[in-house]
Image (tube, grey):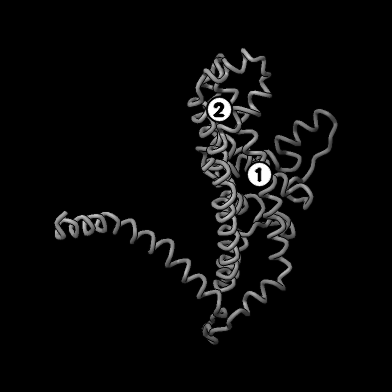
């Protein structure tokens, strides 16, 4: 190939990549670097400007009991939402993939919570959880059970948030499983039936391994969702009572916009980015290679 033509191909390729590269640098790389730099400076005021303090913000974070409580809450929130959402999504996808009366209506009913705005979802569940006048307590009163402040009790507030999140996310994940199920050859099911395999054996040994790439994709999205909840907490609990429902991203929001300590918020953000990076490495070096059978 002529050198000038080869050069033009390279120039043409880089010109096609330039818009995406600009957006990637402007909205991913630059904010990340800026956040890391900000985490090394103190909180600035009119009287005392921000100054370089090194790892002092990280030392303060390490000694901050609220940070550890928030991190503990977030881990339990992830453990409560991720497996439950995936199990429900698979179950719903298996149900609506079969021939059944009103299948389109059932699919729409499962998917509807996904398209609702987050603030609307929070207000719906606020109506459910309101003490005494809420739907849950109204139904409980029919059986002689007294009302309960679901969002005001530290023991029940986090499970209440988990239930609401699973209700919203499971239908979204169901769509991916449904698409994957429709690409499974029907001959596999027929062969398993001829061999006398039960439905559970077919699902465990044949169907679920074929769904593992979809499960990996859903798992990544579920993990990201478990660390980015803000809207629901802002409407329902604002992290209370006594930080019992406070999560890491909401604590970052609170530090930056309620306490105006953007440098400490940057420090918390670096920790959040580090956690997500570790999960990404685990996904790439462990799960992805095992699932795709390279």
Name the secondary structure under disc 1: helix
In which quarter of the view is residue 52 placed? bottom right
Q: Is residue 151 left or right of residue 279?
A: right
Q: Residue at x 29, y 59 (%)?
A: 18
Q: Is residue 217 visible?
A: yes
In which quarter of the view is residue 17 placed? bottom left
What is the residue that sits farthest to the front in this orientation?
Answer: 1
Q: Say which quadrant the N terminus sits in.
A: bottom left
Q: Earlier in the sequence, mark 1 or mark 2?
A: 1
Is label 1 in contact with label 2 (beta carbons under 8 Å)?
no
Q: Nearer the viewer, residue 161 or 235?
A: 161
126 shown above or below 277? above
Q: Residue at x 63, y 38 (%)?
A: 85
Residue where numbered disc 1 is placed: 81
What is the residue that sits farthest to the right in this orientation?
Answer: 144
Residue 94 screen position, x and y as percent? 59, 25
Residue 79 screen position, x and y as percent? 69, 47
Labels 1, 2: front one: 1
Residue 141 screen position, x and y as percent? 80, 32
Classify mark 1: residues with Cα within 10 Å, few (<14), some (14-19) or many (20+): many
Residue where numbered disc 2 is placed: 109
Q: Nearer the viewer, residue 167 or 8?
A: 8
Q: Residue at x 71, y 38 (%)?
A: 134
Name the secondary structure under disc 2: helix
Q: Is residue 76 left or right of residue 288?
A: right
Q: Is residue 230 visible?
A: no
In which quarter of the view is residue 95 placed? top right
Spatial separation of the CA atoms under disc 1 and disc 2: 20 Å
Residue 206 screen position, x and y as percent? 60, 27
């Amino acid at each position: 190939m002529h050198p000038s033509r080869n050069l033009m191909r390279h120039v043409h390729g880089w010109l096609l990549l330039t818009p995406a590269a600009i957006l990637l640098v402007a909205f991913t790389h630059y904010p990340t670097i800026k956040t890391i730099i900000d985490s090394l400076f103190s909180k600035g005021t009119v009287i005392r400007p921000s100054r370089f303090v090194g790892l002092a913000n990280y030392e303060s974070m390490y000694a901050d009991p609220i940070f550890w409580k928030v991190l503990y809450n977030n881990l339990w929130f992830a453990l409560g939402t991720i497996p439950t959402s995936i199990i429900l999504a698979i179950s719903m996808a298996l149900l609506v993939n079969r021939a059944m009366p009103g299948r389109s209506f059932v699919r729409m009913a499962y998917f509807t919570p996904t398209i609702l705005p987050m603030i609307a979802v929070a207000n719906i569940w606020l109506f459910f959880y309101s003490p005494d006048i809420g739907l849950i307590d109204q139904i409980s009163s029919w059986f002689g059970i007294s009302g309960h402040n679901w969002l005001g009790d530290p023991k029940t507030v986090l499970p209440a948030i988990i239930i609401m999140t699973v209700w919203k996310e499971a239908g979204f994940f169901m769509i991916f499983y449904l698409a994957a199920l429709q690409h499974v050859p029907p001959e596999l099911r027929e062969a398993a039936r001829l061999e006398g395999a039960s439905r559970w054996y077919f699902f465990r040994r044949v169907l679920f391994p074929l769904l593992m790439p979809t499960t990996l994709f859903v798992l990544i999205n579920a993990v990201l969702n478990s660390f980015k909840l803000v809207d629901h907490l802002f409407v329902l609990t604002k992290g209370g009572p006594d930080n019992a429902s406070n999560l890491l991203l909401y604590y970052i929001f609170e530090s930056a916009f309620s306490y105006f300590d953007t440098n400490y918020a940057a420090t918390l953000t670096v920790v959040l980015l580090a956690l997500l990076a570790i999960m990404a490495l685990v996904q790439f070096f462990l799960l992805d290679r095992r699932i795709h059978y390279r």
